[in-house]
Each structure stands twice: as structure tokens, then as C-alpha cells.
Image (cartoon, rainbow, N blue to C red):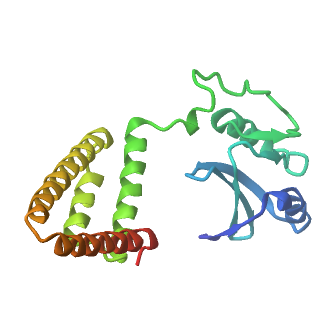
Amino acid sequence: MGFEQDFEPLALDELHGFAESRRAEGWRYVQTLAVLTDEGIDLVYSFMKGGHLANHVVPIARDAEVPSISDVFLAAFVFENEIHDLFGVAIKGIAIDFEGNFYQLANEAPMTILSPEQAAAREKAKKAAAVKAAKEQGVAPEADDMEAKLAAMDPKKAAKVRAAMEAKAKKEAAAKEAEIEGKLKDMDSEKAAKVRAAMEAKAKKAASRAEGGE
């Protein structure tokens, strides 16, 4: 027989009372899973009744203290010890507490350690999101294309390319400024002053747009 399932959010301060209500209503405890997120860790508590699997997601910070529900559902002690050892979550009041010795591990909280590949993938996703946001704000297509290419690169290589681009842009800006100054020297002083004033006003307007995202 098949079953249906759903996922609902649950606040940390409601967790223990919620577990008690589940038991009173005849639900069976299934498992607790931990999922590493950019913001912290999601704890997923699953209960079943009849053909319905209900999953309740409790988002927590890495340093949060979580109440054990093993006094309500004893079987939870296995998952709570595992989550403590693998993710470093502080779970208080576990009925059978192995005190960090449930597993013999080479690294503390190993499931929170990102591999170089995972870190690169997250950096790539972050940059891709930035490119998308820039595009929505009307950034020039050529800049958008370059950001997309940089997002696909190895982070270290992308950083070097950005540094080279910035250095080139500064050099070109300095050369252009020197060229303009050379032309202004040949102008009538009053006309040159007006040109400088117009250039300064244009630069301020561009800076204001960049800061305000207009």
C-alpha cells in the first residue's frame, strides 16, 4: 500500500510539545534527519499514522541547543546521538546519551565540513545568482556574459581574472583622463572649466545611480 507525505515547518521552541501531541494522537515516530544549509542546519522530524508520513522541518543555527524528544519517543535517542556526532548539534536530555562516542570519527562534526568541490559549487551558485540579479537590474549584457563566465570558473582563477580586469580598467581610465587633460590644456580656460564641470556632474550622476541601483 502506498502512502502520502508532506513537509511542514516547525519552530524549535515548539518541538518537544509537538512531539508529545503526536504521541497522544497515535502517531508513530519514524526518524530524525539533519541537512546542512547555508544558514545552519535543518532537522527533519518524521512521524507516520496510517498511510500518512508527516515531515516537520526545524531550522536551527549551528550553535543552537535542541531539546531531546527521546523521553517521548525512546527510539529518537539513536538519531539524536548520530546528529550530535556527525553535525555537532547540541541535543539536551537524550535518554541514552553516548556523549559524543556514538561514532569513532577522525573529524569533529564531519558532515558540516565542505569538500573543495562543494565549496566551489556553492560559490558558483552564489555568483550565478548575483549575475541573475544584475541582469534584472539592467546591467549591460556584456558585463552579464563576463560574470556568467567567471561564475563557471574555478574560484581562484576567477579571482585572478577579476584582479587583471580591474587593473586594466584602472590603466585605461588613467590613460583616458590623461588624454582628456591634454585636450583641455589646448582649450580656452573658460571653456575648459565648463567641460570639467560637466564631466564631474556626469561622474556624480553615474555614481549615484550605481549606489541607488536605479
Q: Image point 44% across, 68% down: which residue?
A: 211
Question: If the image is split into quadrants, where does the N terminus sit?
Answer: bottom right
- The image shows residue 214 at horizontal and vertical percentages of 40, 78
- The image shows residue 71 at horizontal and vertical percentages of 91, 46
Q: Image point 55% across, 52% down: which residue?
A: 38
For residue 192, above or below residue 104: below
Tally of numbered tags = 0
For residue 110, above or below residue 65: above
For residue 70, above or below residue 82: below
- From the viewer's perspective, is 10 left or right of 153? right
- The image shows residue 195 at horizontal and vertical percentages of 21, 73
Q: Image point 37% across, 76% down: which residue?
A: 137
Q: Image point 74% across, 36% down: which residue?
A: 81
- From the viewer's perspective, is 155 left or right of 98? left
- The image shows residue 16 at horizontal and vertical percentages of 87, 56
Res 132 → quadrant = bottom left
